[in-house]
Amino acid sequence: MAPSWSELPPELLGVVFLHLRCLADRAYFAAACRSWRSAAARASTPTPPPPQLPWLLLVPSAGAPCFVSLLAGSARRRISLPHGAHAGGWLGVAANGWRAYALVNAFSRAWVPLPDRMRVPGHGITTCLVVSAVALSAPPTSRGCIAAALVCGVSNLAFVRPGTDRQWLASGSGHGLQDILYHDGEAVRGFHDVANDEAVTVFVQEGVQGAPALRMAWRSYRMQRRRNPPAPRQSPSAGVSRYLVESRGKLLMVVRRFPSVQHGGGAATSRGFEVLELEVQALPSGDHAASWVELDGGLDGCVLFLARGCSRALEASQFGGFQEGIYFLDDTRFDISLALSCGGNFPCSDIGWYSGSEIMPGIKGFPSEFQSTFSSPTWFYP
């Protein structure tokens, strides 16, 4: 009679466990049986878990959510996850199309509700809103956390203290926004946004932290126009999308070019990227001038994962076998009709990797036939 897999020597099981780089694979390993769980506990006690690459979270129209793990050979893994994503396992979800917003931790199951109404200062009104992306200043359960959202409504930008405020606070500034990110900048710490003209505005909380009502102040850099910026619309069939990423303490902007419509009416596909760094200079007046400067050394060993409000930069050297480059998703547009449950599939076709010189369509393990009436694929940060 052949020996059972549960009878493998604990030392061998420990070696196998430590060769699993993906946290999900380690969880599957520990769930196999009692002896494997004991071996996993012994092996993981003296050794911290390996650094993780983001998981590509998929919420199909039918079936359970799953994800693609680049550290697990791009294999698909099924996991019980809620449906934008942030470090530490936090996800932004809409349980009912454009209502019942919340921040959910996929590991602890902590649930922090978000409002579905927006207060417009100076007008004495509240309105509905549709959230397209969320950025966080800190984990949602920490004191003083503020969430910023790109929204569709009377304003393009809104703020809220999760779990505290009953309504979002609409911003009077922020038209034509492309992305927003919380960044400890050279001049000020706060939410940095970038607009269609590449101007940067910074938003900070005004007043004491525990005030009854949230107030936000904003300031703009005196932007110096960079050489050869992409035109807002180079041709009727061209598009430009911008993302903010923090890398090594610096604020980067990734400019992504794509045709609005392919010949034949197909989906848009990316056709070029630029990576620029924000340089800030103090002026005698107390203001700050800023300009976007193209990186001389390219990505310099970084791997960028693009997503509205939650892009990440990681060091390629921490992940054996990975090269510097840019992973991108199909999120250049936000179709409000999909969020309002008007039917149709979310865009899922323009997904891939940019090496710095060549665009490689698709990500290994991503199903080419994937469709979803719930959400486009997004990154999940374990």
Image (cartoon, rainbow, N blue to C red):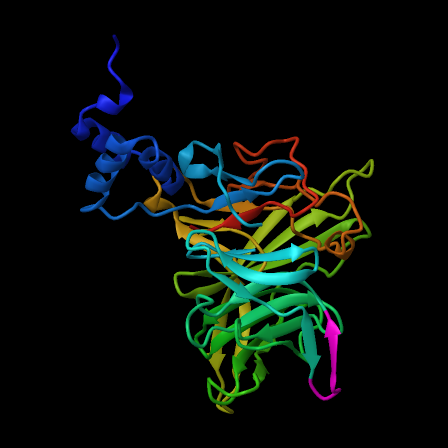
Decide if residue 34 is in sight here: yes
Residue lying at the far bottom of the rendered structure: 285
The location of residue 35, given as percent across then percent down, is: 24, 31
Q: Residue furthest top?
A: 1
Front position in the image: 154 or 326: 154
Image check: 253 left or right of 32? Answer: right
Q: Residue at x 52, y 87 (%)?
A: 206
Residue 125, percent across and down?
Answer: 75, 82
As rendered, which of 51 and 237 lies closer to the eye?
A: 51
Q: Quadrant of the N terminus?
A: top left
Q: Is residue 322 above or below residue 112?
A: above
* 268, above or below 221, in the image: above
Give percent across and percent down for residue 353. Answer: 54, 41
Residue 186 in which image quadrant? bottom left
Q: Is residue 265 above or below residue 338?
A: above
Q: Quadrant of residue 149?
A: bottom right
> Which residue is at a point 47% across and 73% down the rendered structure image?
145
Name the side, left or right, on which 362 lies relative to 373. Answer: left
Magenta range is: 121-128
Is residue 196 visible to the viewer in this orientation of the structure? no
The number of discs equals: 0
Q: Is residue 379 magenta?
A: no
Q: In percent of the image, x 20 and y 46: which residue is there?
A: 45
Residue 125 in the magenta stretch? The answer is yes
Task: Determine the residue positioned at 75% across, 74% down.
Answer: 127
Residue 358 is left or right of residue 322, and the answer is right
- State the image coordinates of residue 144 (x, y, percent, origin top left): 45, 77
209 vs 348, nearest the viewer: 209
Q: Nearer the viewer, residue 206 or 303?
A: 206
